[in-house]
Image: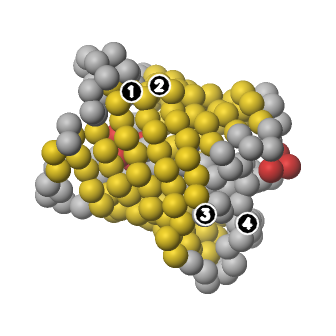
Amino acid sequence: MTALLFAVALGQSALPRPGLQKGQEIVFQVNMVFSDVKESDLGMRQEWRLAFKSTDKGTVGSRKLLKMQVDGQDIKLDKVEEEHWTESRDSRGMPITRSVANDGDMEKRRWIRLFDISFPAASLRKGSTWTTVDDFTELPRLSSSYTVENLDDDYLTIKFSRTESGQSGRTTTGTARCDKRTGWPRDMRGTIDRYTFPDDEERRTYRVEYTVRQTSR
């Protein structure tokens, strides 16, 4: 729902990630379907590869766009965007900031936060809130806030809001639901009820259905 979490404890030793030991790598395949809620068209489909590896500096992640379709037609990827990042956490284990190593498409970067599947369970309660800041190279800083709307044995529902710094000050809101809330689940499905790309002049609202599947370890 809002990004896979991984990280280095700020100024301290790395926080351990559930089920991921030092030197191990875990890989996920992520499929997303974006549908225009007003026109009910076929929308856009994306397939991503996400990888996480435990190192001496903490857990680092990478992401690569493998495939994209719009209205059922394959889109040729002239340049495959691949990102590498690290993330800092507070004393509760919640994320604070992320640093992305390379430049790229702002919209594609944002979607990494759809899949927070490694929250520390002890830190989450209904009504829990936290904020993050994404520091992008040569791109506006992105401030995000999250609130847990519902939490039970099977589902986690989070409401989020993201605001860009600078003149635009664009804000995007959404609600995401996940059927796993701790550790590194092998399979996960969820829905973001509404999402608006900040750079879309028509301000179209999308419903996003996603699946996450562990492919190797």
Give me the C-alpha separation between circle 3 and circle 1. 26 Å
Q: Secondary structure at mark 1?
A: strand
Please name the residue shown 43% across and 29% down the image. Answer: 207
Give me the C-alpha separation between circle 3 and circle 2. 25 Å
Position of 186 with respect to 166 (left or right) is: right
Camera-nearest residue between 201 and 31:
31
Residue 29, quarter of picture: bottom left
Residue 13 lies, in percent from the top left, at 74, 70
Depth-wise, is mark 4 or mark 3 nearer the camera? 3
Position of 16 with respect to 67 (left or right) is: right
Q: Are marks 2 and 1 in contact (CB under 8 Å)?
A: yes
Depth-wise, is mark 3 or mark 1 nearer the camera? 3
The first of marks 4 and 3 along the sequence is: 4
The circle drawn on residue 18 is: 4
The first of marks 1 and 4 along the sequence is: 4
User: Is residue 177 visible to the viewer in this orientation of the structure?
Assistant: yes
Q: Which residue is mark 2?
A: 194
Disc 4 marks which amino acid? Pro
Give me the C-alpha separation between circle 2 and circle 1. 5 Å
Residue 139, quarter of picture: top left
Q: Which residue is mark 3?
A: 186
The first of marks 3 and 2 along the sequence is: 3
Give me the C-alpha separation between circle 4 and circle 2. 30 Å
Disc 2 marks which amino acid? Arg
The circle drawn on residue 10 is: none
Give me the C-alpha separation between circle 4 and circle 3. 13 Å
